[in-house]
């Protein structure tokens, strides 16, 4: 090979090498450049992320030369990523927030000021708005940055902590706007504002200032923060020990359940200066913050540290009328609403104050105690109703677990009956008869409750009333009967609750929603009569009252006791166990002893006012109420008509017990339901004093002693008992299955005996009326029949004035030396086993004994005695002492086979019988109603 060739080849090879190296170097250079580019973009991306995409877009110079393509690429990528992330929010966030606010913040809660300012709100206090508008928010860093309403919770939902920027007036405007929305939303008076400003004596919240003239805004002295905190703490304590003692733990829940808000909301605004409060005040403020919301107490603090964990929202002012809030988060900026023009806001507040004043000054009447719609409330946890007005505002009473029973006191004429009418009307209008049942008893001589029963001119009655007792002043047993009935009902309810494994009526109602478990209110006017004597009635009444008062509360049984006489209340003094249960005290003007000794509020009360006190009468529980006239003509009556028209089909009028009238035999349920045939008939003698109006009845079985003695000298009473016995027996036998022998042994009783005989014959029975002349032979004949053996036909021997025949009966047969008295004794002794029963009237105890002779009194198994002293009767009551002073138109009844002690009875009005002088009218209820001014 030539040298030149070799050289050429070498050069070529080098050339190739150079090219290869050059190519490799170029590639490396490119790769390096690429890395540098990526680095630059990532560097920019990092800085964009640090500054925020939106800011970088707005002010790129802060990061790079805006023309730098690397920066532009990084920014484009960052903006694309941001848009993707925000896409959902941008499309849905603001519109759904708008919707949420529209739904939760009606009317003044979020609408522009001009649409409502100056009008009075009637917002639903049971369901207040949860969110209140403060401005317009947007998220500056979001694409398009759409705006949405900025709202904060208030009232029951959260406290508010505001931190100011260098323009403190912004905070004041913010607070004013918010409060303006709130006070305008509800009826004037529902919201009360307290303000305190560390730096200013006056002039805080200037637009709201007119509210202070009506007491709706209280500006507290800067040096007396303690006073304001005390006021708020007291409210919390009072609300906890009163309104919130039942099932509900917040006023909001309570209001949602019963549709009304008994306590206004209270908003306390505190303007600080960034410095903490004194330690003890700070503690108190924290306590209020922790416990206030359930009691409707909200705090708004401005530049005041508040360190409770829950339920505090914050607003931080950031200049230029803007703010950030804990609700909207740190990204959003809120442009605060401009205030309405100064004049307009204060004019609106002046109008609210004036309206509140005029409502307070309004004269409210009975109709104002009534709800718009009848029977809308349920009594599961308590009964509540307004009973009067305090400066136009309703004053309510509550009967429930926290205040189960009421004591009402006031001298005669102070308006107790009127108060009871108002109370009953307000309750009966709110609760249906399935929610509330009334038992009304008046010991006064008078007819105050007769209005609630049907009368001749007005057939309506109060559908809630189950029992009305009037003129019971001499029949204390009737009060006893009512208490006994309540005690039984209480036990029945407790047993039923036990079956459902609960203890209280409230729980029972939840477990047994289909059951009918109304709350029972038992009103006893002039109840002191119950304790009038030192006798067994008082002893039993005390025991029963104690039982019902102590245990009635959990079974929904509430007592309302009224008395004009301190002795009624004093009767309780030695019995704190009873007295303490009467937590609700109502004192009418000059009432003594109803409130505590140191509480003299009733002494200064004007006419037709009352102190309503749910705190056992201690001073701080006083609420003063003006009581409307509920007894004026047609007042209650009109309500009763409306309620009566709504009564359930088949509802019965209340049972009326009128102590001044006798029960009609023919109307008595126990008489009407007697049918024939029966195996053992019952002879009705009178009516027992009980809630059901039960008959006093003696079973005439075929066993020794089943005879009846009617003892006493008053013809009307004794003949009533004899007649009722015969007539009731007649209803239980088909004709031919009973025969009557009626001995009319005294001239005066002829008419009575014959009237009964006629009625018996009218029913188809065999009746033999015998005179004094015939009685001996008749008794001898009956005695012979007994000797001959039992007859299938019952024989009832009714003897009018047995003792009038004593001499006749004692007359001995000259031959046999036997006398008809022996026959009578035989009939008494052996008759019942042979279906022969004697029902005889003797005019005194001694005369019964004369008839019976030396033997035991066992042949008289049952008796009813009129005008006979108790001690005379003990021999006939198994030897036990009988405590009884005779009283007009009342008897004492004892059946040794069933009774342990005698019981008081009313003789019957037999209807067709000759008029009975002591009786005022046979149309008992009608008479009463007419007297009541019906
Ligand atoms: N709030 C009231 N407004 C107007 N009049 C009233 C008011 N309360 C009571 N009255 C009238 O006063 C009179 C006495 O009232 P009420 O019968 O209620 O008193 P009381 O305390 O029950 O008296 P008493 O025990 O003597 O019956 C009645 O004529 C009644 O109409």
Image: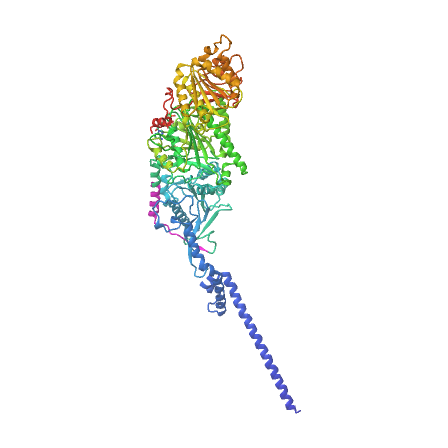
Q: Residue 855 in the image: x percent, y percent?
A: 54, 13
Name the residue nearer the viewer: 114 or 221.
114
Total marks placed? 0
Q: How is the image coloured?
A: rainbow
Name the residue nearer the viewer: 548 or 682.
682
For the record, the magenta segment spans 332-354
Q: Quadrant of the N terminus?
A: bottom right
Q: Residue 933 in the image: x percent, y percent?
A: 33, 28
Task: Tell me where residue 448 sits by quadrant.
Answer: top left
Q: Looking at the image, which residue is at 39% across and 52% down?
A: 337
Quadrant for ligand 1 reads: top left
In the image, residue 814 above or below residue 888:
above
In the image, is 497 to the left or to the right of 350?
A: right
Q: Residue 408 in the image: x percent, y percent?
A: 42, 29
In the image, residue 511 above or below residue 910:
below
The reply to whether the magenta stretch includes residue 343 is yes
State whether residue 567 appears in this view.
Answer: no
Q: Quadrant of the C terminus?
A: top left
Q: Residue 714 in the image: x percent, y percent?
A: 42, 17
Residue farthest to the bottom? 2
In the image, residue 122 above or below residue 783:
below
Task: Tell me where residue 269 sits by quadrant.
Answer: top left
Name the residue nearer the viewer: 891 or 81.
891
State whether residue 91 appears in this view.
Answer: yes
Residue farthest to the top? 814
Q: Looking at the image, which residue is at 55% across and 72% down?
A: 33
The reply to whether the magenta stretch includes residue 480 is no
Name the residue nearer the viewer: 312 or 249.
249
């Amino acid at each position: 090979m030539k040298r030149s060739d070799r050289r050429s080849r070498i050069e070529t090879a080098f050339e190739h090498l150079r090219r290869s190296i050059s190519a490799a170097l170029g590639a490396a250079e490119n790769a390096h450049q690429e890395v540098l580019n990526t680095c630059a973009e990532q560097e920019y991306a990092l800085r964009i992320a640090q500054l925020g995409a939106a800011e970088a877009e707005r002010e790129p110079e802060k990061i790079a030369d805006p023309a730098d393509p690397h920066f532009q690429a990084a920014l484009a990528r960052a903006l694309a990523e941001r848009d993707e992330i925000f896409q959902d929010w941008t499309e849905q966030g603001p519109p759904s927030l708008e919707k949420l606010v529209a739904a939760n913040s009606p009317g003044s809660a979020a609408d522009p000021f001009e649409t409502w300012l100056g009008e009075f709100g009637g917002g639903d206090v049971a369901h207040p708005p949860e969110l209140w508008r403060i401005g317009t928010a947007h998220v500056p860093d979001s694409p398009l940055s759409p705006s949405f309403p900025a709202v904060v919770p208030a009232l029951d939902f959260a406290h508010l902590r505001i931190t100011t920027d260098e323009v403190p007036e912004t905070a004041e405007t913010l607070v004013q706007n918010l409060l303006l929305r709130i006070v305008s939303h509800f009826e004037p008076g529902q919201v009360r504002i307290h303000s305190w400003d560390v730096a200013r004596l006056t002039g805080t919240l200037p637009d709201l200032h007119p509210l202070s003239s009506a007491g709706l805004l209280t500006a507290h002295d800067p040096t007396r923060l303690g006073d304001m905190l005390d006021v708020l703490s007291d409210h919390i304590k009072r609300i906890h020990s009163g309104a919130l003692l039942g099932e509900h733990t917040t006023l909001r829940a309570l209001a949602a359940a019963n549709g009304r808000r008994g306590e206004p909301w209270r908003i306390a605004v505190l303007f600080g200066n960034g410095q903490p409060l004194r330690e003890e005040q700070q503690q108190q403020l924290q306590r209020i913050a922790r416990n206030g919301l359930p009691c409707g107490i909200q705090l708004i603090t401005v530049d005041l540290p508040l360190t409770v964990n829950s339920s505090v929202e914050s607003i931080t002012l950031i200049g230029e009328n803007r703010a950030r809030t804990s609700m909207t988060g740190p990204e959003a900026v809120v442009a605060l609403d401009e205030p309405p023009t100064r004049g307009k806001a204060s004019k609106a507040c002046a109008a609210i104050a004036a309206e509140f004043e005029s409502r307070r000054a309004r004269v409210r009447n009975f109709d104002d105690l009534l709800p718009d719609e009848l029977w809308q409330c349920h009594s599961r946890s308590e009964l509540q109703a307004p009973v009067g007005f305090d400066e136009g505002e309703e004053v309510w009473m509550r009967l429930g677990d926290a205040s189960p029973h009421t004591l009402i006191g006031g001298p005669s004429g102070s308006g107790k009956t009127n108060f009871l009418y108002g109370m009953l009307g307000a309750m009966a209008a709110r609760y249906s008869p399935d929610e509330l049942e009334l038992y009304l008893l008046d010991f006064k001589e008078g007819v105050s409750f007769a209005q609630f029963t049907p009368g001749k001119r007005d057939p309506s009655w109060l559908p809630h009333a189950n029992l009305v007792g009037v003129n019971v002043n001499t029949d204390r047993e009737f009060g006893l009967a009512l208490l006994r009935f309540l005690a039984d009902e209480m036990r029945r309810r407790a047993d039923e609750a036990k079956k459902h494994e609960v203890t209280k009526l409230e729980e029972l109602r939840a477990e047994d929603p289909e059951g009918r478990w109304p709350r029972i209110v038992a009103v006893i006017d002039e109840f002191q009569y119950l304790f009038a004597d030192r006798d067994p009635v008082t002893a039993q009444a005390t025991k029963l009252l104690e039982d019902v008062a102590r245990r009635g509360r959990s079974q929904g049984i509430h007592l309302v006791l009224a008395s004009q006489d301190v002795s009624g209340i004093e009767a309780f003094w030695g019995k704190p166990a009873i007295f303490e249960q009467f937590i609700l005290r109502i004192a009418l003007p000059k009432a003594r002893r109803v409130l505590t000794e140191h509480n003299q509020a009733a002494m200064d009360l004007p006419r037709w006012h009352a102190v309503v006190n749910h705190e056992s009468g201690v001073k701080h529980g006083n609420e003063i109420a003006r009581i409307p006239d509920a007894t004026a003509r047609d007042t209650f009556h009109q309500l009763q008509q409306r309620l009566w028209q709504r009564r359930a089909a088949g509802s019965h009028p209340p049972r009326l017990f009128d102590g001044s009238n006798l029960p009609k035999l023919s109307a008595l349920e126990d008489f009407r339901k007697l049918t024939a045939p029966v195996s053992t008939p019952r002879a009705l003698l009178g009516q027992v004093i009980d809630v059901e109006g039960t008959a006093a009845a003696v079973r005439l079985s075929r066993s020794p002693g089943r005879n009846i003695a009617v003892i006493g000298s008053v013809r009307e009473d004794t003949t009533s008992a004899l007649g009722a016995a015969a007539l009731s027996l007649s209803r239980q036998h088909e004709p031919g299955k009973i025969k009557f022998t009626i001995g009319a042994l005294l001239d005066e009783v002829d008419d009575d005996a014959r009237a009964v005989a006629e009625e018996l014959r009218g029913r188809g029975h065999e009746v033999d009326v015998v005179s004094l002349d015939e009685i001996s032979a008749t008794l001898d004949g009956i005695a012979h029949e007994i000797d001959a053996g039992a007859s299938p036909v019952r024989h009832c021997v009714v003897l009018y004035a047995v003792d009038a025949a004593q001499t006749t009966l004692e007359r001995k047969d000259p031959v046999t030396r036997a006398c008809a008295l022996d026959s009578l004794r035989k009939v008494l002794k052996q008759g019942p086993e042979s279906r022969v029963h004697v029902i005889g009237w003797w005019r005194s105890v001694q005369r019964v004994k004369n008839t019976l002779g030396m033997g035991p009194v066992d042949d008289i198994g049952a008796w009813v005695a009129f005008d006979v002293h108790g001690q005379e009767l003990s021999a006939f009551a198994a030897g036990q002492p009988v405590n009884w002073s005779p009283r007009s138109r009342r008897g004492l009844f004892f059946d040794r086979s069933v009774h342990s002690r005698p019981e008081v009875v009313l003789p019957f009005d037999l209807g067709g019988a000759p008029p009975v002088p002591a009786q005022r009218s046979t149309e008992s209820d009608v008479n009463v109603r007419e007297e009541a001014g019906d």
